[in-house]
Image (cartoon, grey):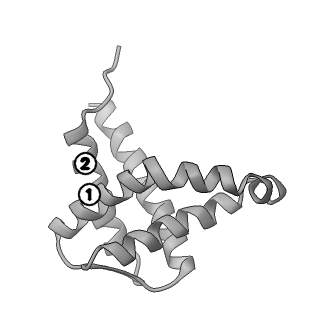
């Protein structure tokens, strides 16, 4: 039976995923790894608080768009993080959507890779 990763390991994985996504996307700029840690913390807080509220408010739009509106909600979350964190810069909505997708994909891959060891 596998244990769920602890808070510290999730923070490290999320920070590394944010840093890797910054490296891969030209429209994203993160000043340092400590900024990436801050981004991971803020994204975790926003995903736990603001995202569920936005999902509830936009249920009709999400339903009509067959779930694609969730990409816009993810971009909004990244935009809020961009406003709150001094060392994070995201150039456009499309870049925010790609950044969100990459962070999720990289984090998932890192967790799967860690389980296989």
Image coords of residue 105 (percent x, y)? 46, 53
Residue plotted at (77% across, 60% down): 61
The residue lying at 15 percent from left, 66 percent from top is 34
Q: Check disc 1: other Cα within 10 Å, few if <14, some if 14-19, many if 20+.
A: many
Give the Cα separation between the discs numbered 2 and 1: 6 Å
Does dot 1 land on a helix, a strand or a loop?
helix
Badge 2 marks a residue whose secondary structure is: helix
Residue at 41% across, 59% down: 103
Quadrant of the rendering where the C terminus is positioned: top left
Q: Work out which quarter of the rendered image holds the N terminus and state it.
A: top left
The disc placed on residue 48 is none
Give the residue at mark 1. Answer: 15
Q: Are marks 2 and 1 in contact (CB under 8 Å)?
A: yes
Q: Which mark is residue 11?
A: 2
Q: Exactly how many numbered labels are in the figure?
A: 2
Q: Eyeballing the image, is 56 above or below 23?
A: above
Q: Residues within 10 Å of mark 2 (few under 14, many from 20)?
A: some
Where is residue 95 drawn, in percent x and y?
Answer: 50, 77
Please tell me which residue is depicted at 74% across the width and 52% down the height of the picture.
Answer: 59
């Amino acid at each position: 039976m596998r244990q769920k990763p602890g808070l510290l390991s999730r923070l490290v994985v999320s920070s590394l995923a944010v840093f890797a996504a910054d490296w891969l996307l030209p429209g994203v700029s993160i000043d340092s790894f400590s900024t990436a840690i801050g981004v991971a913390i803020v994204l975790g807080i926003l995903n736990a608080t603001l995202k569920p509220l936005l999902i509830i408010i936009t249920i009709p739009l999400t339903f009509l768009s067959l779930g694609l509106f969730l990409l816009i909600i993810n971009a909004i979350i990244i935009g809020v993080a961009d406003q709150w964190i001094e060392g994070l810069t995201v150039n456009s909505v499309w870049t925010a959507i790609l950044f969100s997708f990459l962070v999720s994909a990289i984090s998932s891959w890192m967790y799967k890779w860690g389980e296989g060891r």
